[in-house]
Image: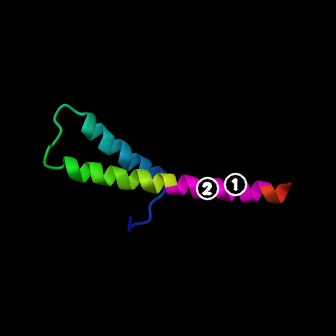
Amino acid sequence: MAEKMSYGEAMQELEGILSRLRGVDVDIDSLAVDVKRATELIAYCRQRLAGVEEEVDRILQKEE
């Protein structure tokens, strides 16, 4: 994912894609593009969550 985005922005874009995919009139021509982008966003969010978890663990270990 080339551009910098916040976790919230990634989730918002992902929710938009999911909304389109759940719709009655799914554009079959953009389906593969939307699914690819969704998988990229999911990977990005997982990476951000893992990074934050590590940071929180480090902070808590310093407090002990």
Which SS class for mark 1?
Answer: helix
Q: Which quadrant of the view contains residue 26?
A: top left
Q: Residue at x 23, y 33 (%)?
A: 23
The residue under the point 57% across, 54% down is: 50
Outermost residue toward the bottom?
A: 2
- Distance from label 2 to label 1 (Cα)? 6 Å
Amino acid type of the residue tagged 2 in the rendering: Val
Left or right: residue 55 versus residue 37 is right
Residue 18 spot, x, y in % from top left: 32, 40
- Which residue ends up furthest to the top in the rendered image? 24
Q: Which residue is mark 1?
A: 56
Instruction: Categorize mark 1 by other alpha carbons within 10 Å: few (<14), some (14-19), many (20+).
Output: few
Residue 4 among those drawn in magenta = no
| CB contact under 8 Å: marks 2 and 1 | yes
In the image, farthest residue toward the left: 29
> What residue appears at the point 43 percent right and 47 percent down from the top-left corner?
11
Residue 54: % across, % down:
65, 57
Q: Give the residue number, with chain letter if any, for mark 2.
A: 52
Q: Magenta residues, as a range?
A: 47-60
* Image side of residue 6 versus residue 34, left or right: right
